[in-house]
Structures are given as structure tokens and as C-alpha cells.
Amino acid sequence: IVTTLFPLAITPELSRLRDVAPGVLWVAALLSSLLALEFLFRDDAYDGTLEQYALSGQSLTWLLFAKTAAHWLLTGLPLALMAPLAGMSLGVPPAAVPGIVASVAVGSVALSLIGSVGAALTLGVKRSGALLSLLTLPLAMPVLIFGARATELAIKGGGYAAPLQLLGALAVLGVTLAPLAAAAAVRINLE
């Protein structure tokens, strides 16, 4: 919805829309990933499921990683699949579609993992949406920067491998560290 409003707010000129498309696509991706993060662990915390996970003898880290992966499958993957349609409404050439899909897919993995740490830290806080945004947005800035750069290079027809590799590195770093941090935050919250 955000990307379809930009042509109405700025101008319907394709050249100007194409110039702002990377930023618009990535800000929309970031905002849409933030929408569902508040509920990532909240219901499980309220009904005692997280406590049962912690007492089950299973690795809480792996359980939270699986929950975050399911979150990405329900939010990040559809976002990556819808990004070309949003891009085309901003005048993005069809040749840029593979680069856009790849960057949004890899970047949304990193956003989900960063968000899982923020969601775990804000467990038990009523109306935690604003606090979650304040915690998550500064950590998501590198993803936004490299994702927008990869998208910009894909639109201009250049090689977008370098920013995409940096996005991949952020995603790998997130896979490595975010579940550990989220599990530690959940354990602290349960005490």
C-alpha cells in the first residue's frame, strides 16, 4: 500500500519514481516487517508456552529460531515475492526484478532476526510497539542501507553482488547471534 501511495504523493513521472524506488521499497519492507514483530512471542508469553519451552529440556535457542523462521516465511517471503509488483508501480524495469527479489529476501531474513531480539526484549511490556521500534530501527539501518543500494544497482543495471553479499553477511550474523540473544532475553523475562 505504501508503494502505491508514493506516485500519488510525489509525482507520476517514471524517471523520478525510478530514482526514489529503492528507498521507498526498503522503507516499506522495513515498516511492514515491524508490524508483526510485536506479536512474535507475546501470545506465547501470555499463555505460558514460552515458559513450557524453557522447561521442556529442548534448546530454547532452537525453538525461538524456528519461531522466527516461521515468522519470516509468513512475512518476509511474501514481501520478497510482492516486491517486484511494488517496484513496477514505481517504474522499475523488469530486468531489475531478480535483484530486487534477492535483496528483499535476504534482507528480510536479517530484519526478522533483528526483530526477534527486540520482540524478546520487550516481552511483558504493555503496548510495546513503540519501544520495539526504538530498539529495532537502529539495528536495522545497515540492512536498509545495503538493501537500498543493491536495489538501486539492480535498477540501474549494474552489478549488485557486493551489497547483496553484505546483506547475506548480516543475515548470517543474525542467524548466528539473534537466536542466542532472544533466548537470553526470554530467560531473563521468565525469571
Image (spheres, grey):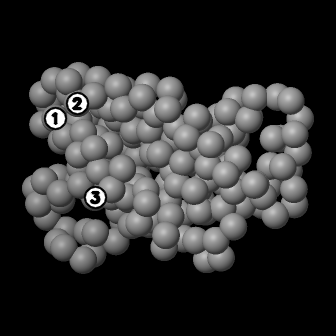
The residue indicated by pointer 1 is 153
Q: Quadrant of the N terminus?
A: bottom left
Q: Which mark is residue 163?
A: 2
Observer-side mark, 3 or 2, equals 2
Amino acid type at circle 2 is Pro
Instruction: Using the numbered discs, state the Cα–Cα distance from disc 3 to disc 1 in whole angstroms.
Output: 15 Å
How many numbered discs?
Answer: 3
Q: Quadrant of residue 123?
A: bottom right
The residue indicated by pointer 3 is 24
Q: Quadrant of residue 148?
A: top left
* Residue 103 percent coordinates (x, y): 35, 35
Q: Is residue 158 visible?
A: yes
Q: Is residue 89 left or right of residue 119?
A: left
Tags 3 and 2 in contact by the CB under 8 Å rule? Answer: no
* Residue 38 percent coordinates (x, y): 61, 63
Amino acid type at circle 3 is Val
- Which of the two residues, 61 or 150, is positioned nearer the viewer here? 61
In what element is the residue under mark 2? helix
In what element is the residue under mark 1? helix
| Residue 185 to residue 34: above or below | above
In what element is the residue under mark 3? helix
Residue positioned 50% across, 59% down in the render: 34
User: Of the residues under marks 3 and 2, which one precedes in the sequence?
Assistant: 3
Instruction: Using the numbered discs, state the Cα–Cα distance from disc 1 to disc 2 in whole angstroms.
Output: 9 Å
Q: Is residue 69 visible?
A: no
Q: Quadrant of the C terminus?
A: bottom right
